Image (cartoon, rainbow, N blue to C red):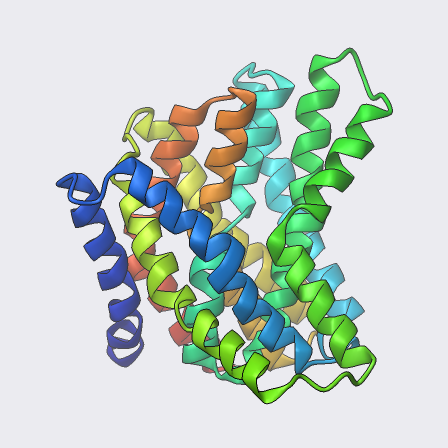
Amino acid sequence: MLDIFLKTLPFFMLIGLGYGAGRTRFFTPEATAFLTKFVFYFALSAMLFRFSANLSLGDILDWPFVLAYVSGTSVIYVLATLVAMRRRLSVAEAAVEAQCAVIGNVGFLGIPMLVLLLGEAAIGPVMMVLAVDLMVFGSLIVILITGSRGGGMNWQVPFTVALGLVKNPMIVSIALGLAVSANNIPVPVPINEFMTLLGGAATPGALFAIGASLATKSAERVGVAGWLSLCKLVLHPMAVAVAALVIFNVDPYPAGVMIAAASLPVAGNVFMIAQHYAVAPARVSAAILLSTAASIVTVSLVIAWVTTL
């Protein structure tokens, strides 16, 4: 356990460095926004393209894996929704809380950390988790919020969902990389080195950006944030573990990667959605802050356990 903790500590130290820079205003919110944009559209996209260009669709697409992750995640999604509805929240607020309960920071934190700690073979499973989060649950929250506001579903809702997926650079870079791999298109050496160099900025840039963005988050609604953090850090990996290991009999290694990915703290893009639709952004902000702080311990515990698989 101590060995795993010491390996994860540098990642959280980078987040802490970004938090300190943001908290002291040495790194302003505007600077954080531009750094996040650089990582999201350039560095992380280059990393994902390079990874996926060296994989085939068969290396990533494993239906028992997908079904296990979707099933385990759906259980916690429904649980968080029922608890929210029990508190008489609107459909939009319930959808945002459910999103907090199941969507982890796979892109900015999971890909660099899990690939380093669990080996390069973790690339495929982590990318599959990321794709499911973006395509399934990322679409679901848009459908629920827009559908609850406009008096029901209309033709604009699927258009909005599709446009959001097409405009997401992580989805585009994975798709382009897999297309290059499927067609056996050789990547020229200078392009490959360019992608390697640019992608190398993704890990420190993303972690620093996470920390700097946390400096602007508030700790309001701590009780709700604690419940959502419990869902994300404890209940979500537990549900995914049962689905993967007991129900769908996923191979131990990809199952371990899936469980580790499910243990990550609440993703920053949930706050972006909540802010965009003006649905409980302060609540999401607190959940991100609290879950990220607690994950220093919980993620290490989960990774220590899955390495025994």
Judged left or right of residue 88, residue 113 is: left
Judged left or right of residue 30, residue 200 is: right
Rendered residue at 25%/70% (across/down): 10
Rendered residue at 60%/76% (across/down): 51
Viewer-proximal residue among 156 and 103: 156
Viewer-proximal residue among 286 and 67: 286
Q: Indicate the position of residue 161 as horizontal and vertical percent values.
A: 74, 37
Q: Indicate the position of residue 195 as horizontal and vertical percent values.
A: 53, 75
- Whether residue 73 is situated above or below residue 148 in the rendered picture: below
Judged left or right of residue 171, residue 20 is: left
Q: Indicate the position of residue 204 as horizontal and vertical percent values.
A: 33, 65
* Residue 61 visible: no
Residue, far front: 190
* Residue 33 visible: yes
Viewer-proximal residue among 276 and 220: 276
Rendered residue at 17%/40% (across/down): 23
